[in-house]
Image (cartoon, grey):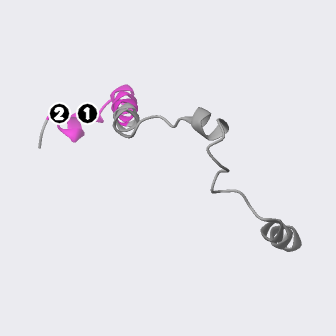
C-alpha cells in the first residue's frame, strides 16, 4: 500500500530485522517508556502485588 512492498522488503534477512527494529522503536516512541521512578517515589504500592492469601494459594498449588 504505502512505502516498500513487503515481498521485496523481506527478501533479505537483514532488511527484515531492520524493519522489525524500526517497528519496535516506533511503538516505543508512540507509547513511551515506563517511568519506574514514579512508583518508587511513594505514589502508592504497585497494583500487581499479591496478598498473603493469594501467596498461600499459589504455594499450595506448587
Q: How far across and down, in percent of the image, does residue 21 sit?
A: 40, 31
Q: Foreground: 40 or 22?
A: 40
Dot 1 surroundings within 10 Å: few (below 14), some, or many (20 or more)? some
> Helix or strand or loop: what does disc 1 sit on?
helix
Q: Evaluate if marks 1 and 2 touch, with contact meaning CB atoms under 8 Å apart.
A: yes
User: Is disc 2 surrounded by few (<14), some (14 to 19) or many (20+) residues within 10 Å?
Assistant: few
Q: Residue 31: x percent and y percent?
A: 38, 40
Quarter of the view holding residue 20: top left
- Residue 29 forms part of the magenta stretch: no
Screen quadrant of the C terminus:
bottom right
Residue wearing tag 2: 4
Residue 9 horizontal side relative to residue 18, left or right: left
Distance in Å between CA atoms under marks 1 and 2: 7 Å
Magenta residues, dominant SS class? helix
- Would you place residue 31 above or below residue 13 in this image? below
Residue topped by disc 1: 9
Residue at image coords 39%, 31%: 25
* Residue 29 location (% of width, % of height): 36, 32
Q: Is residue 46 above or below residue 26?
A: below
Q: Which residues are magenta?
A: 3-23
- In the picture as drawn, the residue positioned furthest to the left comes out as 1
The residue located at (11%, 44%) in the rendering is 1
In the image: residue 46, left or right of residue 4: right
Q: Quadrant of residue 24?
A: top left
In percent of the image, x 47 and y 34: which residue is there?
33
Per the image, label 2 sits on a secondary structure element best described as loop
Which residue is depicted at the point 82% across and 73% down?
57
Amino acid at each position: 500500500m504505502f512505502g516498500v512492498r513487503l515481498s521485496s522488503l523481506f527478501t533479505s534477512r537483514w532488511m527484515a530485522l531492520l524493519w522489525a527494529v524500526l517497528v519496535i522503536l516506533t511503538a516505543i516512541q508512540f507509547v513511551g517508556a515506563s517511568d519506574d521512578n514514579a512508583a518508587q517515589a511513594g505514589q502508592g504500592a504497585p497494583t500487581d502485588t499479591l496478598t498473603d492469601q493469594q501467596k498461600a494459594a499459589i504455594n499450595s498449588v506448587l
